[in-house]
Image (spheres, helix red, strand yellow):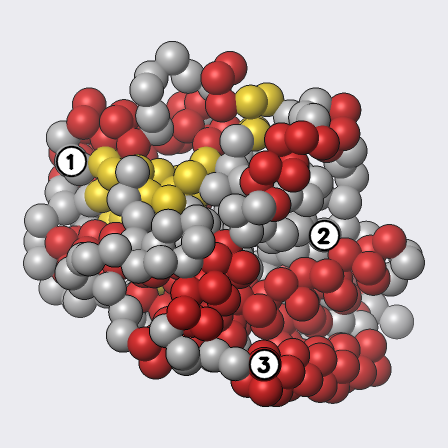
Amino acid sequence: MFRVLDDAGRAGAGENVPDLRERVELYRQMLRVRRLDERMTALQRQGELGFHGSTLGQEAIPVAVGRALEPEDWVFPALREGAVMLVRGYPLADFLAQSFGSARDPQKGRQMPSHPASRRVHQVSWSSCIATQLPQAVGMAWASARAGDSAIALAFLGDGATSHPDFHAALNLAGVLAVPVVFVCQNNGYALSVPTAQQTRAESFAIKARAYGFPGERVDGNDALAVWSRVRHAARRARAGEGPTLLECVTYRRGAHSSSDDPSRYRSAAEEAAWAARDPLDRLRRHLLLEGALGDADEALLERECAEELTAALAVARADPPPARETLFDDVYALRPWHLVEQARELP
């Protein structure tokens, strides 16, 4: 399994790793995502949000992916990768609007919470149907290649998605056509409540790429530097016309599958404690301390900035009105048919 940092935060020798300034930015963005997740979980428990899919323990992967891609690349997320949008510059208040379903949300409140999307930052909405985003990403990558564009597609999936037919269809077509797509599997140990051992008899998920004729690699998903490195490498391969890559990022979902789940029913407290000791944020923090790139004053400043940004963005999101009723008829047809014209006219 590829890694740059050991559990104590010590860096091994390696090429294609981010410089020290980029490592600090990775930490800042991961801290921001952690604090956002804590706030959103609390809001769901307080009844302000209907649903939340926690990223606790998995922050390194979406943050590193967001920093490793080029702005023109398209992201096809699953449940826990919405933060890629923030890393790529999407405004936090607009991001929060999706969970509140307010007028600021470009999806006009039509998607359930934790399903953000925006053309501005090239992120497609996830449908909540497992693995459907994979063939969609292949289609986009194929179209990009045919048009001679430099953009690639990156598709996220969980370990459970590998058991769905769309996984096979997408990877097979991607391999046959050698399209510029990167598949990132977040192997967090459980497909909701089904452990990895009950998902496959293969020695890994990465090895499945061999059957489709392209590389697969296991990466330590709790090592932000390792994820950044391998995504950059896979993206370069795709952009150079060398075809797809499957990256299996081994991590752990420390929280519940969603706010509707009780993980104590299917995993032990000892297992959770063991993975908490391998927390990706703590590991990168230890590394930056060893490198002299982070101190107590720096941490305090980052925490204060995160808190102030969250408080201000939440105030905007809470004050935002619901989408206008007439938007019910938007984004359905390029040319509005007669029956919707009549319905829109009769809207009170």
In which quarter of the view is residue 303 placed?
A: bottom right
Q: Residue 106, percent across and down?
A: 60, 71
Q: Residue at x 12, y 64 (%)?
A: 148
- Where is residue 143 shown, x and y percent of the image? 23, 54
Residue plotted at (72% across, 61% down)? 38
Q: Nearer the viewer, residue 219 or 151?
A: 219
The answer to whether residue 146 of the structure is visible from this angle is no
* Residue where numbered disc 2 is placed: 52
Question: Residue 324, relative to residue 200: is it above or below?
Answer: below
Residue 154 point in image, percent of width and height: 33, 53
Residue matched to label 3: 296
- Secondary structure found at label 1: loop
**CA separation in Å, label 3 and label 2:** 32 Å
Up/down of 159 relative to 332, above or below? above
Q: Earlier in the sequence, mark 3 or mark 1?
A: 1
Position of residue 18 measured from the top left corner of the image (x, y, whole percent): 28, 69
Identify residue for label 1.
214
Please indicate whether residue 177 sits to the left or right of residue 273 in the image. Answer: left
Q: Which amino acid is tagged 2?
A: His
Disc 3 to disc 1: CB gap under 8 Å: no
Which one is earlier in the sequence, the residue at label 3 or at label 2?
2
Q: How many marks?
A: 3
User: In the rendered structure, which amino acid carries the disc numbered 3?
Assistant: Asp
Residue beneath the point at 17% across and 67% down:
150
- The correct choice, above or below, for 187 with respect to 290 in the image is above
